[in-house]
Image (tube, coloured by chain):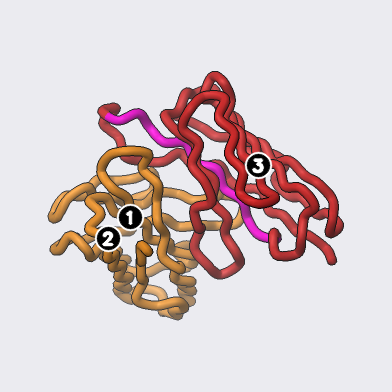
Chain colours: A red, B orange
Amino acid sequence: TQLLEQSPQFLSIQEGENLTVYCNSSSVFSSLQWYRQEPGEGPVLLVTVVTGGEVKKLKRLTFQFGDARKDSSLHITAAQPGDTGLYLCAGAPFYGAGSYQLTFGKGTKLSVIP
Amino acid sequence: DVKVTQSSRYLVKRTGEKVFLECVQDMDHENMFWYRQDPGLGLRLIYFSYDVKMKEKGDIPEGYSVSREKKERFSLILESASTNQTSMYLCASTVLAGVYEQYFGPGTRLTVT
């Protein structure tokens, strides 16, 4: 069974601070996805990283895929209240592995206090 | 834009009732999924379908069934609702190949009393 461990589980920071969320596994994934979920809504895809070592930027958010494709991180610079939400990472299987399911982490709940 | 819609945002049902949750996607995706989300437990896969009339059990199928008569529509059925099925139910869809990015509906908050 593949597992994705996210840390921290909860994070409460002041507006303007920087933060990093981690997503770790002992399994190798073909790609790693990050979603953000606001209260009462479904998760929304933020980014997919595919290549080991890949770094992607989305405004103040920086996503990195580990070289071995087992882990990923999300760094937010100068957090804003609009960044508040549940951040989920999800690992995708390799094509042909016989599975189409994503492995989800349990999420990091971020609160940015104005 | 991919759109996944769910029939209800909020639903209150009584114990023992049969409950239908419907999900429709407009992107011609082959795969569709039903999850439930509970605090501390994360997203748990109930059932998924990779084709019309095909279904596969996920991690927690007990007490649930599904129906996929058309490619765009995937229904989750609670045969006899129980209080431990009170949860947020999320539907998602994805293409059959590639990076399997999932597109989620807005969710249905089901309360069973």
Residue A51 placement (x, y as % from top left): 48, 27
| Residue at 31%, 51% in the rendered image | B47
Residue A15 placement (x, y as % from top left): 84, 59
Name the element at disc 3. Answer: strand
Q: Is B41 contained in the magenta span? A: no
Q: Foreground: B78 or A80?
A: A80
Q: Let me know if residue B79 appears in the view.
A: no
| Residue at 29%, 64% in the rendered image | B25
Q: Number of callouts in the render? A: 3
Q: Quadrant of residue A79?
A: bottom right
Name the element at disc 2. Answer: loop
Q: CA distance from mark 1 to mark 2?
A: 9 Å
Name the element at disc 1. Answer: strand
Mark 1 touches mark 2? (CB < 8 Å): yes
Inspect the image, locate mark 3, and give the three-letter code of the amino acid beneath it: Thr
Q: CA distance from mark 2 to mark 3?
A: 29 Å
Mark 2 lies on residue: B27
Say whether residue B45 is left or right of residue A72.
left
- Disc 1 and disc 2 on one polypeptide chain: yes
**Can you say whether A97 is above or below A36 in the image?**
above
The label number, if any, that marks residue B33 in the structure image: none
Neighbours of disc 1 within 10 Å: few (<14), some (14-19), many (20+): many
Q: Which residues are magenta?
A: A84-95
Residue B45 placement (x, y as % from top left): 40, 49
The label number, if any, that marks residue B93 in the structure image: 1
Mark 3 lies on residue: A62
Q: Quadrant of residue B104?
A: bottom left
- Magenta region, mostly helix, strand or loop? strand
What quarter of the picture does the N terminus of chain B occupy? Answer: bottom left
Q: Is A91 contained in the magenta span? A: yes
Neighbours of disc 2 within 10 Å: few (<14), some (14-19), many (20+): some
Give the mark toward the camera: 2 or 3: 3
